[in-house]
Image (tube, rainbow, N blue to C red):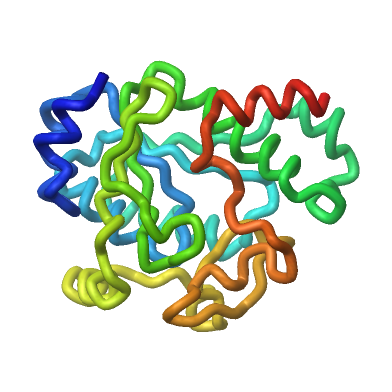
Amino acid sequence: MYEVVIANLNHLDGPDLLAPLISDVFCGNIALVSSFGAESAVLLHMAASIDRSLPVITLDTGKLFSETIAYRTQLTALLGLTDLRVVTPQTDVLRALDGAGSLHRRDPDRCCQIRKVLPLENTLTGFKAWISGRKRYHGGLRADVATLEETDGRLKIDPLARFTRQQIEAYLDRYDLPRHPLLEKGYLSIGCAPCTVACGSADNPRAGRWSGLSKMECGIHRSPIATRNSAASAA
């Protein structure tokens, strides 16, 4: 469906890629998904420089660091974002599947599924494209991230996929963007508080996510259809 768009724009990165997609190709049908994590300020600044009214979707799992929530408030005000959509898990699903709030200890994949994957899938309904902040230098399953790919009938855009760590740091410095407060405490990648520890390196910044487990991703970057089917079979 989006072969022409991918062919014409795949060579672009950063704002050069975002501008035509936000302002023209998908105007009114595109959203940015942000965790307000360690490097989120870069992508949010790029998008806000193009259109501050772009819908920005963020998942509040109920288990975020208080510092992340404060950082979200800070960046939203600083960048003048006018359409921030804070998405939370469905109350009845949490009550049925994680009433004690301890699901992350015994089944982290399912915890991510009900607190992140399914809420995001529901929120993206109606959008033709969405923007995420994955980068190849994070390694693991992100080592070969495409800047543009079609997933389940929707275009997925990763304008920072080819950016290096040095480019990210240079952008933050150039625009004097505030860093996430947990960075100075040793958190190089920041997710939910129970499943994130302070560690990581330049070569493996996501080492602190689900430390000690083989788990590498929360699941939102997998096929929503496959995830939905998995949830149905597990219920």
Residue at horizontal 69 percent and vertical 69 percent from the top: 211
- Residue 12 is left or right of residue 104, and the answer is left
- Residue 189 visible in the shown view: yes
Q: How far across and how far down the image is residue 160, in percent?
A: 27, 56
Closer-to-camera residue (184/144): 144
Q: Quadrant of the C terminus?
A: top right
152 over 146 or under it: above or below: above
- Give residue 80's position: percent from left, percent from top: 27, 47
**Image quadrant containing the N terminus:** top left
Position of 22 with respect to 231 (left or right) is left
- The residue shown at (49%, 81%) is 201
Residue 62 located left or right of residue 25 = right
The residue furthest right is 100
The quarter holding residue 75 reads: bottom left
- Report the residue at 39% width, 54% height from top: 134
Q: Position of residue 114 (x, y in %)?
A: 70, 35
Frontmost residue, 129 versus 194: 129
Instruction: Determine the image quadrant of residue 167.
Output: bottom left
Nearest to the observer: residue 126 or residue 233: 233
The reply to whether residue 31 is in sight is no
Q: Position of residue 163 (x, y in %)?
A: 25, 64
Q: In the rendered view, would you say 110 is above or below 30?
A: below
